[in-house]
Amino acid sequence: FDALQAFDPDISDVLLSELDRLRSGLQLIASENMSSPTVLTALGSTLSNKYAEGYPGRRYYGGCAEVDKAENIAIQRCTDLFGAEHANVQPHSGASANQAVYGAFMKPGDTLLAMSLPMGGHLTHGAKVSFSGKWFNAIGYGVDKQTENIDYDQVEALAKEHRPKVICAGGSAIPRLIDFERIRAIADEVGAIFWVDAAHFIGLVAGKAIPSPVPYADVVTFTTHKVLRGPRSGALVCREQHGKALDKAVFPMMQGGPQMNTIAAKAVNFKECATPEYAAYAKQVIANAQALAESLGEKGIRPITGGTDTHLSLHDLQGVEVTGADAEKRADAAGIVLNKNAIPFDPQKPNIASGIRVGSPCVTTQGMGTAEMKQIGELIHRAVTQSDGDPDHPVAKEVRAQVTDLVGRFPAYAR
Ligand code: PLP
């Protein structure tokens, strides 16, 4: 770091300020985490230099003996961790892993059935602004108005009506467990591939804290940087019968050279995830998310579906008459980082939204427990309902002082 600081203070200052930002606020973005210094070491290694198009033992470049070892280790650990038949650890991100599913199983114009974005799905599941919505005939399913859970009857009816090539389960704002068995049965009934995008919750699966989609799905894609706590990247596991098609779809169809430093970092992360400490972490992530959802609910910030089974909860702010955009800004001014989020049947536009999404992965990594979650819920409520987004507002200042005290007791990247 000293060499970087001497050569490029502009960038070293950004690195230091970002560490400062992480340490001085509450990080509640549900899709973020703080990967270990061990993972970061592999990420910042000389493996970044190596071109290795192809797969271990079948590369288009020489000099791949060492990176082959790293990729083989990553593949073995990934299949072991998830009890999968086949793994591909090359996708650069969650979106790239999803592209591989389209590449392997669909042609432009084919039909996809997936949760729609405003109901909790992801951009890459057929949203009109994404390649997935532009190139494929995407049919969206949603949630039941009463329970706010996935409307499985609707999934079944739409599947029978549209006969999709692929049915996708998973999304970015789903607080509850998904009934994989039910969707598998629907996929079988219409002869569709069953794809689970487990980006959000795969870490909970790795820690054996929630049921796995792997026995049910043809393919499971995921990001490696959310609850899982690895490097910013993606991966997929699948049934052996689809291995060749998905490997070809990752490379050469969608990607060029894999990032071997990131693959090494994924290997390190998969090893971390197989430890008892990580299993305890995954359980605590859920306990903390539940405590936080309950604390906000007690203050009138209603959790969608009544709570959570996972690492995140989605909250309806209409009861406290604040928009998602205002809530995000007010929380931010008080040192609390969270995001506005559309809620099912949201009357607001997506860039305003009626909800917020909060997640427990980061604060749990920092060592916080359910008592702290109760306090965080109260702090969010105060900031969101009693301040105005100005960092100098007295309530923002008061909340920020309590946030500073709290994060000071659980420092991020404590030495
Ligand atoms: N799939 C889901 C369900 C996600 O939530 C995300 C990102 O948040 C992605 C895919 C895309 O991942 P990436 O940002 O790594 O492309």
Image: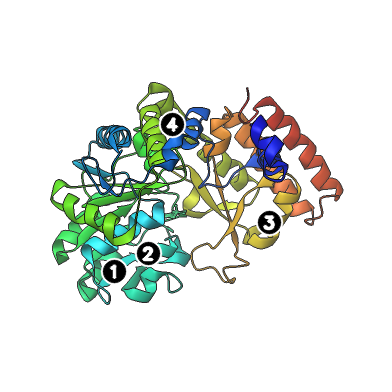
Mark 2: C-beta under 8 Å from nearest atom of ligand 1: yes
Callout 4–callout 3 Cβ contact below 8 Å:
no
Outermost residue toward the front?
A: 62
* Nearest to viewer (mark 1 / mark 3): 1
On residue 125, which mark appears? 2
Query: Residue 112: x and y, percent?
Result: 28, 69
Nearest the camera: 290 or 410? 410
Q: Which residue is mark 1?
A: 112
Q: Which residue is mark 4?
A: 283
Residue at image coords 45%, 49%:
175
Q: Earlier in the sequence, mark 3 or mark 2?
A: 2
On residue 327, which mark appears? 3
Ligand 1 resides in the quarter of the picture at bottom left
Instruction: Specify few, some or many for label 2: CA neighbours under 10 Å numbering under 14, 14-19, or 20 or more.
Output: many
Residue at image coords 73%, 37%:
403
Query: Residue 41: x and y, percent?
Result: 50, 31
* Nearest to viewer (mark 4 / mark 1): 1
What kind of element bears circle 2?
Answer: helix
Q: Earlier in the sequence, mark 4 or mark 3?
A: 4
Residue at image coords 79%, 57%:
388
Callout 1–callout 2 Cβ contact below 8 Å:
yes
Mark 3: C-beta under 8 Å from nearest atom of ligand 1: no
What kind of element bears circle 1?
Answer: strand
**Splitting the image into 4 quarters, where does residue 353 fall?**
bottom right
